[in-house]
Image (tube, coloured by chain):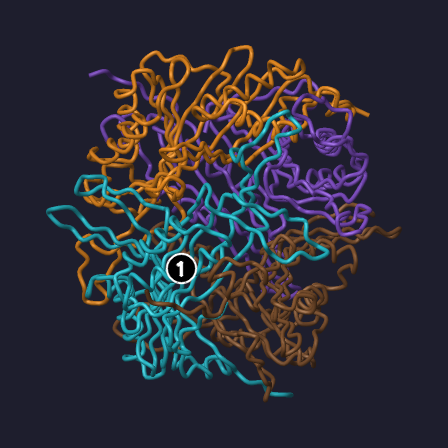
Chain colours: A purple, B brown, C cyan, D orange
Amino acid sequence: MPTFELGPNQYGKAETRLVRVERAAGGDRLTDLNVSVALRGDLAASHLTGDNAAVLPTDTQKNTVYAFAREFGIASIEAFAARLAEHFVATQPTIHEAKVTIEQYPWQSLGTRHAFRRDASEIRTATVHHGHYGTQVVSGITGLVLLKTTDSEFHGYIKDRYTTLPETRDRVLATSVDATWRAAEGFTDPGPARAALVEAFADTYSLALQQTLFAMGSRVLLRCPDVVEVKLSLPNRHHFLVDLAPFGLDNPNEVYYAADRPYGLIEGVVRRDGAVIPEEVVWSF
Amino acid sequence: MPTFELGPNQYGKAETRLVRVERAAGGDRLTDLNVSVALRGDLAASHLTGDNAAVLPTDTQKNTVYAFAREFGIASIEAFAARLAEHFVATQPTIHEAKVTIEQYPWQSLGTRHAFRRDASEIRTATVHHGHYGTQVVSGITGLVLLKTTDSEFHGYIKDRYTTLPETRDRVLATSVDATWRAAEGFTDPGPARAALVEAFADTYSLALQQTLFAMGSRVLLRCPDVVEVKLSLPNRHHFLVDLAPFGLDNPNEVYYAADRPYGLIEGVVRRDGAVIPEEVVWSF
Amino acid sequence: MPTFELGPNQYGKAETRLVRVERAAGGDRLTDLNVSVALRGDLAASHLTGDNAAVLPTDTQKNTVYAFAREFGIASIEAFAARLAEHFVATQPTIHEAKVTIEQYPWQSLGTRHAFRRDASEIRTATVHHGHYGTQVVSGITGLVLLKTTDSEFHGYIKDRYTTLPETRDRVLATSVDATWRAAEGFTDPGPARAALVEAFADTYSLALQQTLFAMGSRVLLRCPDVVEVKLSLPNRHHFLVDLAPFGLDNPNEVYYAADRPYGLIEGVVRRDGAVIPEEVVWSF
Amino acid sequence: MPTFELGPNQYGKAETRLVRVERAAGGDRLTDLNVSVALRGDLAASHLTGDNAAVLPTDTQKNTVYAFAREFGIASIEAFAARLAEHFVATQPTIHEAKVTIEQYPWQSLGTRHAFRRDASEIRTATVHHGHYGTQVVSGITGLVLLKTTDSEFHGYIKDRYTTLPETRDRVLATSVDATWRAAEGFTDPGPARAALVEAFADTYSLALQQTLFAMGSRVLLRCPDVVEVKLSLPNRHHFLVDLAPFGLDNPNEVYYAADRPYGLIEGVVRRDGAVIPEEVVWSF
């Protein structure tokens, strides 16, 4: 019987839902997270023979997430993810690399000390890789839906046998921003990066969603000197002008159909010149 | 061969996605709707023999939604739903009742004239029934997630053979508000009703989610004199205190596990004394 | 300060996920359920003052679900739901009505004694109401997606100012079946009802989805003598023929676009003549 | 003002929903696909200045998907994806690489010539990269949920300060299989690979989900001589035995709670010895 080889592999506990309440006289602070851990190391025996001597159970990883929230608090999702990732590698001789991904769901105070409203409009994210190369942090936001009612054109593109799209000098442009960025070292306050993305979307006169993407990434680099690289994934949420002529009506860019599928998907990286991208930031899973 | 009888039936176009842009010098206004139509009437022939002479196609209903947005604008989702419902009954002799349900997705201006951010934290709703009884409007909100870090107890309940829940004098209370309300006539500005719900959730010291529900409904009735009835569906989004003792740690109401399922579900109606409930507005669960 | 009135209300534990394994020499039997309980009764005090003396906690309801699975087994979801509903009313003087809803996720044996594959193509459902009126059982299936490639027409409908839909003598007809049915007493084997629905969809030449709906409901009544009423909710999952003429291609009913939204929604009840519908089994939409 | 650099980027039309009907005397054949296209090439101008002269619009990509279904049919999702990917690169001088991803939703005949039932239990997938390196095809399945009622243990793992999990000699093991595989050249019939995955899950006595993963990957390599590499992502869908002791009941591996989150996630690659992995198979998006 032939033998086969174990290639890249990892395991961990995904989607541990952690809510932490810091109680304070001036008003509580609420931190609402979804934490996923993935570990790599000397894990061949578990795969080949079911010998788990090198395996830190995913249940223990979950416990560690909760215990660390109490022991160390959560200064930021980046710092919390880094602490967890470093812990698993530092304390387990069989674990050589850790990736910790955190989603943070924002809440807004209702003006009292104890009551909050979930702000479902966007999610903050952090992904930390830790290994022999040190600690690499990627910050981000996802789920932020933006729309411009005008100042967007699309024309001058290739026409071939399969082209039917008419050129347009005025369209609605809408997208759901999925952005990540990386600092040269450590990580930076996500506030200015997030603000730069929104601002650039709003004030860029767009001839293509690609142009808007580059403008958004560039604005982050302009405003956040520590950031060396921004990655954006921007679905083009098409809004089609409805043809009302059959009903004897004009439609002066007023009534639109918001389509679900298909959708354009524009993705790209904007870098500070000469930025070096660490290989370990891309895991194959 | 036996013959069978056609019972209650309805048909219509569901989930027509309509976005309307009102362009104005001071800044555009964006209205983002999901419109569902259901019609009732002399529809037996379509069911029994496939004779569609009495059927207004659902495609036409969709077209009407778009055309009306242009012809009449959208002053409010209640008014727009009522206009549509009344139109179908008024213009089609075979259609005797119409129900129009609209979800409105809010957007916030980004401070420029043309750019907006979707506010995904809650959805405004309206359901209009129109028939021989006139026009009945129900307004609402859904998807509003609220949480209190304290000021919530739960004890004094029935214990039986299957009880394991310990009583608590201090718990996190969280829910996703699904609320509808009805005015004696027509409909009212939803702003005060929405504000009353949030305010009552925040300032009610809770001994049961039922008590919070009644307080929320009562607050709407108190603040909105036109409203005669409020219906609330409140899932209890459990936040369980994590037992950190195995790790040598205490947990002074700080670290919680946010559970997905199962969840409590508390539902109820709060009415102004003597409110008469029209049969056609079905409040059943 | 005005006082307000508590209207209809209920509470319970929703979505308790229960998997039961019956171990047998010839092969295990797997039962995978999602159980939701709702109770009604003397619950005013809990709403008005937070006095929970009449409240059986939802946590206890969940425990009862798991304990009953062990104590009594699960002969069918109808019988299990009835046992639970009757238990809550029988054992709690403050609880007068119970509604238990169960979804069952089917699994198929992989041919060994212990291994199974989830069949995600449809979900079996049961809803049981128990109160002073006795026990009312409604059985059903949901999520069953059916399609016919031809033998479906749609024409002869009303044309008005907003009509653009062309008549068709040959279209794809697709739907996702959501069906419930009720026996005169107790409940019946769901197999024949399910088979009748599928068979009638397949062999009915359709001039309207309404006609298909009535044929499906009638077939259940024909095949299942105990069943007195069938309710169907059938979304019309539109498949639009793509216009390939711009590319110099014909499209002889071959290439379709499967649309997401909007969609037609056809709903109706088919009854055995003279069937008496208990008020407590709400058939409203 | 500083200048920034455009890094890796791509664009395309995602989720074009295509249904093709091949009409035949012996029974129609139904092909139900979700097609996503991503292109790379000389796209800097579109990003930097909004000059779209090098851009083939995503709308045209969608049209091409539909037209090719008519012109060339769909012999397999792998062949269809390859044809599309090669077309975009061959016909557009500005496009140098294409990635086409297809999901196929299976349908089962209802025994008549024209009627079908959607089989929602698993999805077939194919991803094709085409560029200067030629055409690379990855086949797969996703969403296949499997469960074993026994023959699964988990013990012998690391214990640390945060361990609470008890060892077990008998547990339920369940997962949702997400598998992809790659042939040395071209692609192979997915049937044997799919069968090997299911068979190995069923007949492997498991000491760890990692061991099951390796067995599943190895079985594919054993049965499919052309396949050089299998990648598996296996969530551990935890089924926890419910503690019924408080109710005076035992629980001899009979009644389980099926948890949603968190969940273990085990991922790994199994390779034929010496398999060379083309770099282009991993795109950073």
- Crowd around label 1: few <14 · some 14–19 · many ≥20 (10 Å): many
- The amino acid type, in three-letter code, at marker 1 is Ala
Would residue A23 be visible to someone looking at this image? yes
Tag 1, which secondary structure? strand
Residue that sits furthest to the left in the current view: C25
Q: Say if D30 sits above or below A272 in the image.
A: below
Q: Say if A221 sits above or below C34 in the image.
A: above
Q: Position of residue D56 (x, y in %)?
A: 67, 23
- The one of D170 and D98 positioned closer to us in this rendering: D98
Residue occupying image coordinates x 51% and y 51%: C236
Label 1: which residue? C179
Q: Quadrant of the N terminus of chain A?
A: top left
Residue occupying image coordinates x 40% and y 81%: C41
In the image, taking residue C220 as reference, residue B63 lies left or right, namely right
Would residue C60 be visible to someone looking at this image? no
Residue occupying image coordinates x 35% and y 17%: D228
- The one of C187 and A269 positioned closer to us in this rendering: C187
In the image, taking residue A125 as reference, residue C62 lies left or right, namely left
Q: Say if D34 sits above or below C119 in the image.
A: above
Q: Position of residue A76 (x, y in %)?
A: 57, 44
- The one of C108 and D170 positioned closer to us in this rendering: C108
In the image, taking residue A62 as reference, residue B12 lies left or right, namely right
Q: Position of residue C187 (x, y in %)?
A: 28, 68
Q: Quadrant of the C terminus of chain A?
A: top left
In the image, taking residue D21 as reference, residue B36 lies left or right, namely right
Q: Chain of mark 1?
A: C
Q: Say if C220 sits above or below D12 in the image.
A: below
